[in-house]
Image: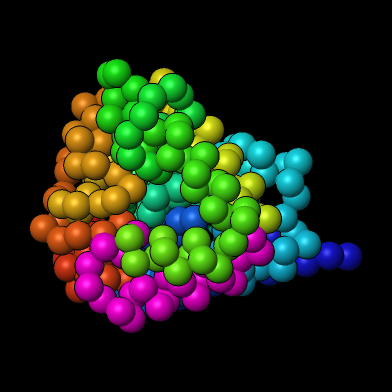
């Protein structure tokens, strides 16, 4: 018999509070990315942490390329974890990709979620025609961050020399001049098997959740930094206006896509505000 999903994805429940909180990491990291955030919440919540299946901390043999070719399989994993732990209600904090996983999970099982807190979230990754910058993609009505030509260059760079790509991308993503955060993000990127990293990146960039945002009735708080190479501030406004429930935006006056690494104290403050609203 193989390992259970809880074992395979290194699920942990930490803390002594009565309410459950999920901390879900994004692409290129693992649950360790929350290590500087966890102390602020473990006395008030039972905090659920896990590694998404693509993370370098998970046995790569568990990554099924046929199964994980859409975000739905990641949603299945999240819901199975919550059901296995007997969670009937939780606060969900998702970073980047995991924000979208949380949105899809809340559409399927809204009764499970008291609130979604979406950090550095973008609903659109679909490749389209255009020229400009890179990463989350743009069209005439939606400015998500990156265009098709530049995204293909990213994929080519990842495929041809993964180490060089990580060394170039990690400082851009962290944004702020925080060398320890760059080293930590580089470490978790290097821990990923390059072919899995590329495959998941392609899956993410070909996703478009704009059409389902209105189906989310769970209250949401969008946390966005003032300058993020991956997600422009306009995306936070777009999410607030198009998610179907009661939504708020928390702006962090800092730079970078990974505030839990670069500015954990400030992010913890904004998370506390979001949870209290």
Q: Is residue 245 above or below residue 28?
A: above
The quarter of the picture where residue 112 lies is top left
The picture places residue 152, in percent across and down from the top left corner, at 52, 39
Mark count: 0
Confirm whether residue 89 shows in the render. Answer: no
Position of 51 compared to 117: left or right? right
Residue at 54%, 53% (x, y): give it: 157
Quick one: 3 or 89, which is closer to the camera? 3
Residue at 50%, 61% (x, y): give it: 165
Quick one: 85 or 201, which is closer to the camera? 201
Q: Is residue 184 above or below residue 106?
A: below
> What is the span of residues highlighted in magenta in the rendered image?
173-194
The N terminus, quarter of image: bottom right
Confirm whether residue 202 shows in the render. Answer: yes
Q: Residue furthest right?
A: 1
The picture places residue 208, in percent across and down from the top left corner, at 46, 28
The picture places residue 185, in percent across and down from the top left corner, at 42, 70
Position of 112 compared to 261: left or right? right
């Amino acid at each position: 018999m193989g390992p259970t999903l809880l074992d395979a994805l290194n699920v942990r429940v930490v803390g002594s509070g009565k309410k459950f909180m999920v901390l879900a990491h994004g692409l290129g990291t693992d649950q360790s990315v929350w290590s500087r955030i966890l102390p602020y919440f473990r006395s008030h919540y039972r905090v659920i942490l896990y590694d998404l299946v693509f993370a370098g901390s998970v046995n790569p043999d568990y990554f099924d390329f046929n199964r994980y070719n859409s975000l739905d399989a990641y949603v299945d994993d999240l819901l199975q974890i919550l059901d296995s732990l007997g969670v009937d209600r939780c606060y969900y904090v998702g970073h980047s990709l995991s924000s979208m996983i949380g949105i899809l999970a809340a559409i399927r099982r809204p009764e499970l979620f008291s609130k979604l807190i979406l950090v550095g979230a973008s609903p659109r990754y679909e490749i389209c025609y255009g020229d400009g910058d890179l990463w989350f993609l743009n069209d005439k009505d939606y400015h998500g961050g990156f265009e098709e030509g530049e995204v293909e260059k990213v994929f080519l760079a990842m495929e041809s020399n993964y180490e060089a790509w990580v060394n170039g991308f990690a400082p851009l993503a962290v944004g702020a001049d925080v060398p320890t955060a760059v080293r930590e993000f580089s470490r978790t990127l290097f821990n990923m098997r390059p072919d899995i990293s590329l495959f998941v990146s392609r899956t993410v960039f070909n996703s478009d959740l704009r059409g389902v945002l209105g189906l989310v009735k769970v209250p949401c708080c969008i946390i966005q930094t003032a300058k993020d190479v991956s997600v422009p501030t306009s995306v936070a406004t777009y999410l607030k206006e198009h998610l179907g429930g009661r939504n708020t935006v928390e702006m962090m006056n800092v730079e970078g896509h990974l505030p839990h690494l670069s500015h954990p104290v400030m992010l913890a403050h904004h998370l506390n505000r979001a949870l209290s609203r």
